[in-house]
Amino acid sequence: MPKISIITPTYNSENTLHGTVEALLRQTFSDFEYIIIDGVSKDRTLDKLKSYIPRFEEKGVTVRIISEPDKGVYDAMNKGISLAQGELVGITNSDDWYEDNALEIMWTKYTDGKTDRANSMLYGIERVWKDDKIFNVQRRGAAFIAESVLPHSTFFVAKSVYDKYGAFDLSIRVLADYDFICRCVSQGVVLGEVDVVISNFRLGGISSSYFDFYSDYYMIQHKYGFISDKKYKEYKYLLKVKKLVNKVTKRW
């Protein structure tokens, strides 16, 4: 069985998946499987993915491609998680990419004897790109989970955690990953921070929508008791006002 499972959800990703796949082929750690969950792409995504299979086989990496209708990116991720056979699971989207030694670093941390392997989630630093330039480097400590969203693209989660606490809640459109992390931590799962750049994230995905992002964010903050009922109502009202102002200014 592979030590790590890597999952990539795709849909019409022929123009963005190259960097994601090439980064996996460059990994210094090769004891992993690669699972692609495609939402029946209409472009050449599947053809491109299949063309990489021989190179993965040369590394001893098994590739599984599932192409079928889904209910969105989190549904695709859930499908991949259910298929994962590795002890540790990472998710990299089709416009993100890992650092070349990301898997090696995470497996080394996971097996250092200090980590509760059956009850842990690891995450590192995320480098954020915009228009092919470095926009930001997100370094957020686990202690601040009540105040900020942690870098999802760097997360590696023990499969046993997914098995015990479930995966992503499909009723949450944008921040189901943040909800999952909060849910697990509230149940005692240990967050382990790795102070190294693990993944690169390109701005422009679904979570880049300001209003959708903060609507989910405040809801989750309230759900897990990070903000009071009063604060939640205030934030919802302010968000509603901002959305209305944005709509009016765009019209005029």
Image: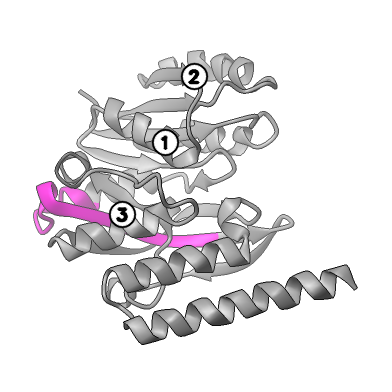
For the residue pair 129 and 57, the one nearer the viewer reads as 129
Tell me the SS state at disc 2. Answer: loop
| Residue position marked by numbered label 2 in the rendering | 68
Q: Is residue 191 left or right of residue 135?
A: left
The secondary element bearing badge 1 is classed as helix
Q: Looking at this view, is 212 or 1 the one in front?
A: 212
The Cα–Cα distance between marks 3 and 1, rounded to whole angstroms, is 13 Å
> Is disc 1 surrounded by few (<14), some (14 to 19) or many (20+) residues within 10 Å?
some
For label 2, the crowd category at 10 Å Cα-Cα, with few meaning under 14, some 14 to 19 and many 20 or more, is few
Closer to the chain start, of discs 3 and 2, is 2
Rendered image quadrant of residue 52 = top right
The reply to whether residue 139 is visible in this rendering is no
* Amino acid type at mark 2: Glu
**Residue density around tag 3, few if under 14, some if 14–19, many if 20 or more, within 10 Å:** some
Does the magenta-highlighted stretch encompass residue 205?
A: no
Residue at image mark 3: 180
- Looking at the picture, which amino acid does disc 1 mark? Asp
Under tag 3, what secondary structure? helix
Dot 1 or dot 2, earlier in sequence = 2
Q: Is residue 200 above or below residue 219?
A: above
The alpha-carbon separation of the residues under discs 3 and 2 comes to 24 Å
Which residue does the numbered mark 1 point to in the structure image?
Answer: 75
Is 52 left or right of 111, judged from the image as shown? right
